[in-house]
Amino acid sequence: MTSPSAPSEGTRLAAPRAVHRAGESALLAEYPDTASVLAAAAAVQALDPPHLVDLVPAETTLLLSGTAARDLDSLRALLDHLPAPGEEQSAGTERSIGVVYDGEDLTEVAELLGLSPDALIAAHTGATWTAAFGGFAPGFAYLVPGDVPDASDVVSAQTDGSGSPGPPWDVPRRAEPRTAVPAGAVGLAARYCGIYPRSSPGGWQLIGRTEAELFDTARTPPALLTPGTRVRFTAQRAVSRLSATTSALARARSEAAAVPSRLARRRGARAVPLEDARPALEVLAPGQLLLLQDGGRAGQGAIGVSTSGAFDRGALVRADVAVGNSPRAAVLESLWGPVRLRALVPTVVAVSGAPGTLTVHRTDPEVGELELEPAEAQDHAIALDPQDVLVIGPPTEGLRRLLAIRGGVRGVRRTTADPGPGASAGASTGASAESGAVLGSLSRDTLSGLGPAPLEAGDVLLIGPVHGLDAVPDRAPGPTGAERESEQEYASGADERSPSAAAPSLRIPVHFGPRDELLGSEALDALTSTQWTVRDDSDRIGVRLDGPALPVPERSGSLPSEATVPGAIQVPPSGLPVVFGPDHPSTGGYPVLAVVTRAGLDLLAQAAPGSTVRFIPAD
């Protein structure tokens, strides 16, 4: 590696080897190595284009997500003319992380690498590791050995083909993954080093443990190791080897001691303090699954945080507009139902999404009960008085119903022992606690656990002020753009959503790529010609499909990890496609054959198990 030096004026990074479309508004650019990816990411960040929503580096690819399809041409042109980042942009943050090298797999890993345990520790602490990309879980960084070259090194490597330096650390994953790997475990797998930010299943080879806090939503940025961060590990001596229980208790005491300062930071960071919110509805019965969802937390894929948000975005907008809220304000997303809620103050609500009945049990006997059939209940503002009970019936067809409350949901007050990430009081006592936004969103990410936990009986919904909001329309105005396309397809395909085998399939528009060339025309033809059945293990993470297995060419069943987007149709070795939902992992190693459009995702959000779908070209 050459000594650090700023590139000469006018020096540009080499254009990517290839650029693929990744859905309606994203591009996936290929580079020769991780160093080139990080250099390109640094250059794009420095330019800060206004239409860029997310920028996610991976091992040899860089994902750029725009706001709309019209942004694709400008993003592609940007990649072809990236100026080399200056020395200050390419230097990266440096972190020192202490590790106790007593991992269960330390001896076995040393043997695999032809080293003694002491030599392995010396090699691990002697290397400079670089956070190449995030994924798997929020705060989990894939670390690669060797320094990240400065900008002039990247330009030189791209010119002479030398690539990025670094010793090989190719360690296979465990044959049988562990059901639980403790938080802070340091592991090796497939040329990477990683630190588990929380307890989770995992198959990496464990060589040690650290007390470093990898992810904290009260910190800016929340991830300790962001792409480009350089890491040096230092060996620490353990005074005594703690049992798993004792270690967990020690970590819990440490986290409890930090609660007051974290709460102060969280409260200071809120755009709308929960102190300004007021109770509006009490949950009496949550149904099968009742979540808070809004427009999601975009722009954080690089640290392993997916967008999340309402699955049916068109329904989110329509419900909010019906009560005068700004579009994409937080709502309740109900799976199946029925849901029962009690009004605590005078308020206005509206339901959208899957059709179903709506009943209001009035406390005033002179008013009488309100019973709405599915056609009347959709997108219609309904006034509630204190102690009125609202019953959102199960969908008569479809899967998810969304409830908006005038003022927008700002948080939840609960009495459960675990208020979930983002709790603002009483989190460790089981007393009344208020859960608010996490990383700028109330959305519950069912994969990572970010956001307020699923709602339960007794939880109280807190809403924001209603002054300054739009007037409540007599009927919600019709959607525009993607929302109109989604609603029209949904209305025209009412019979198509029946699980009956005799019903025609729901037609889901897709954009081909980014890995359609890798999987071949045969796989693409099979994808679009097959009638697929939605499996009962589908969820917000992914819609899993049954049907004839797609042909997967040899050696194309896995790829170096690369960023994914909602709607990505991933093809695992089984050949049975999985369509990523809003809570999808931010990176994945299986090829993506096509990407469902935003309107198509709204339709899939309402595809119940047993429904049949067909994929059609979007263009």
Image (spheres, grey):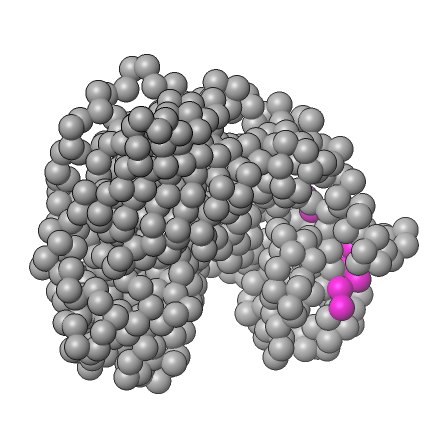
In the displayed structure image, the side of residue 388 where residue 127 appears, left or right: right
Magenta residue span: 95-104
The quarter holding residue 189 reads bottom right
Q: Residue furthest right?
A: 240
Q: Quadrant of the C terminus?
A: bottom left
Task: Please give the count of numbered marks on the rendered protein.
Answer: 0
In the displayed structure image, the side of residue 446 where residue 299 appears, left or right: left
Q: Residue at x 26, y 57 (%)?
A: 396
Q: Is residue 513 above or below residue 383?
A: below
Q: Residue at x 67, y 54 (%)?
A: 183
* The stretch drawn in magenta includes residue 100: yes
Q: Residue furthest top?
A: 467
Estimate the x, y position of residue 453 in percent, counting from the top left. Answer: 53, 45
Q: Is residue 121 visible?
A: no
Estimate the x, y position of residue 375 in percent, counting from the top left. Answer: 17, 47
Q: Residue at x 71, y 32 (%)?
A: 258
Q: Is residue 584 above or below residue 298?
A: below
Q: Is residue 444 above or below residue 528?
A: above
Estimate the x, y position of residue 61 in percent, counting from the top left. Answer: 36, 58
* The stretch drawn in magenta includes residue 263: no
Q: Residue at x 25, y 26 (%)?
A: 324
Q: Is residue 197 visible?
A: yes
Q: Nearer the viewer, residue 606 or 5?
A: 606
Q: Nearer the viewer, residue 191 or 322?
A: 322
Estimate the x, y position of residue 250 in percent, counting from the top left. Answer: 80, 46
Q: Nearer the viewer, residue 502 or 587?
A: 502
The quarter holding residue 126 reads bottom right
